[in-house]
Image: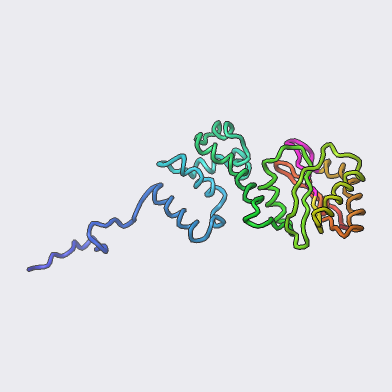
Amino acid sequence: MAKTKMPPDRKPSAQEGDAVFASTGPAGHRKRMRQRVLAHGAGALADYELLEMLLFYAVPRRDTKPLAKSLINQFGSFSAVLESASDVLHGAGMPLGASALCTQLPHVAACLVHDGSSGRAYLGDWDSLVQYCNTALQAEERPQMRMLLLDSRNTLLVDEQLAWPMHAPAEDVRHILQRALEVQSCAVVTVFLAQQGQDVQALLQSSAPFVAALRKAAPLLAVSVHDHLVVGPELWASARQMAPDW
């Protein structure tokens, strides 16, 4: 039997009838993104790509990249999108299902941080402290003051709200150090959660008497003061970074 030759302008595939690409369009793009996450973790994705993937579940048959980039442009950052109310996100173009999901993610992250089964949070460096404030403290009401008490390995023992408005510095310091002794804490970080529009630098300056009193008294009880932070929705201020003699 004579063999049938392929036309000269056509290349043979592994199996006749197979497509060159397994998929084209959004479906193939989504599959490739999922494969990247499985192979390298979500950290391998850009912020807009993470938001893009969150939108997959509410937008099943449309490219979500333009919407993800548009939302980040409107709100300023990926975290600002997640921190916005569901109706605000929906008004900006996000489908209702996705907006409801996104607004719950900060609460989910906070639960993971606080969950004892996953281990206590490590807060021994600036990056870990910022991450904790962006997750566990993100959904807290503002304004308020919190104290973070750490053990000798700088892992979190206690995260508690302090009375606000604050009392006299000496009284607040006494309360913090008494609590530190109760839980056998070796270090403390105080965090003031500021409201939108509040001047974080001015708030930091106004807390100077409290910070000075805490730094003076804590070493007498072998407790280290790591920092006092003022954390706004967008801006930060650190007493440690502003004090050259810390």
User: Where 180 falls versus 165 (above or below)?
Assistant: below
Q: Is residue 78 left or right of residue 242?
A: left
Which residue is more in the foreground, 26 or 170? Answer: 170
* Residue depicted at x 56% and y 52%: 46
Residue 77 can be seen, yes or no: no
Q: Quadrant of residue 218?
A: bottom right
Q: Residue 142 at x, y = what percent?
A: 74, 37
Count of marks overlaid on the render:
0
Which residue is more in the foreground, 34 or 72? Answer: 34
Q: Is residue 61 left or right of residue 219?
A: left
Which residue is more in the foreground, 148 or 49? Answer: 148
Q: Is residue 178 left or right of residue 45?
A: right
Magenta-tinted stretch: 190-200
Q: Residue 72 at x, y = what percent?
A: 58, 42
Question: Is the C terminus in the top left, top right, bottom left or bottom right quadrant?
Answer: bottom right
Question: Is the N terminus in the top left, top right, bottom left or bottom right quadrant?
Answer: bottom left
- Tell which residue pokes out farthest to the left in this image: 1
Q: Residue 69 at x, y = what percent?
A: 54, 43
* Residue depicted at x 51% and y 40%: 67
